[in-house]
Amino acid sequence: MTDHFFTINTNGTGLYKEKGSKFYAFAFAVQSKEQVAEEIATLRKTYHDARHFCYAYIIGNESELIRANDDGEPGHSAGDPILGQIKSANLTNTLVIVVRYFGGTKLGVGGLINAYKTSAEEALSQSRKVKEYITSKVKINYSYNATNEVMKLIDKYELKIIEQEFLEACSLEASIIVSNHKNLIEEVQFLQDTNHDIKLI
C-alpha cells in the first residue's frame, strides 16, 4: 500500500497558438467534483466569448475519480490529451482546463491533440508539484506517568497532534502516515505488555 501521492499546490497557466487559434491552459489543485465545477464556471465567465472549455481531472489518494471532457471538439482530441499530461506527471487532485479561441482555420484531429497536450503540459510545468502523505487518525489514552513514553511515540512516528488533554487520565488524537500505523500498534502493545498504561484506540 502506498503512503503518498503527488499533487500541485500552486496554479499554473500555459498558452499555445496555432493557425490563429489560441489555447489558454489552467492547472488547479482540486479536492472534489464541486471544485471542478466552480473552476469551470469561473473561466466560462472570464472567457465568455471562447469556443471550447475542454478539461480533465484526477481526484483521490488512489486516483478514484478520473474524467476527460472534449466540450464539442472531435472525440478524444482534447480531454484525453489533457488527461495524458496529468497522468504522465503522476498527479492526482489536479484539474487542467484548456480554453480555446477558434482562429478560423481547422487544425485537424492531430493538430488539436498536439495543441491541447502542449498547452496542458505548459500549465502543469508552471505549477508546483508536491508530495503529500496519506494519513489516518489515531487516539491514545494514557496515564500521566506514561507521558514520556507517549512523547517518544509522537516523535518516532511523526504524529501530528489534532487534540490533546492533560488530566489525571490523558488522551490525544493525532494523524499518522498510514505506513507507520502498524508499527505504532505493535509498539503500543509492547508497552502495554511491559506495564505501561497506554492504550491505542
Image (tube, rainbow, N blue to C red):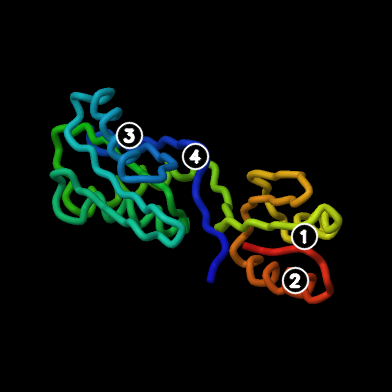
**Dot 3 amino acid type:** Glu
Counting residues from the N terminus, which is met first, the one under dot 1 or under dot 3?
3
* Residue located 36% across and 60% down the image: 64
Q: Secondary structure at mark 2?
A: helix
Observer-side mark, 1 or 3, equals 1
Counting residues from the N terminus, which is met first, the one under dot 2 or under dot 3?
3
Tag 4 residue: 126
Q: Which mark is residue 10?
A: none
Label 2–label 1 contact, CB within 8 A: yes
* Residue located 43% across and 62% down the image: 62
Label 4–label 1 contact, CB within 8 A: no
> How far apart are the alpha carbons under marks 2 and 3?
45 Å
> Label 4: how many residues lie within 10 Å, few (<14), some (14-19) or many (20+)?
some
> How far apart are the alpha carbons under marks 4 and 2?
44 Å
Label 2–label 3 contact, CB within 8 A: no
**Dot 2 amino acid type:** Glu
Q: Which mark is residue 187?
A: 2
Vertically, is 65 above or below 36? Answer: below
* Residue located 40% across and 40% down the image: 27
> How far apart are the alpha carbons under marks 4 and 3?
18 Å
- Is 58 placed left or right of 175 in the picture? left
Counting residues from the N terminus, which is met first, the one under dot 4 or under dot 1?
4
Q: Which mark is residue 39?
A: 3
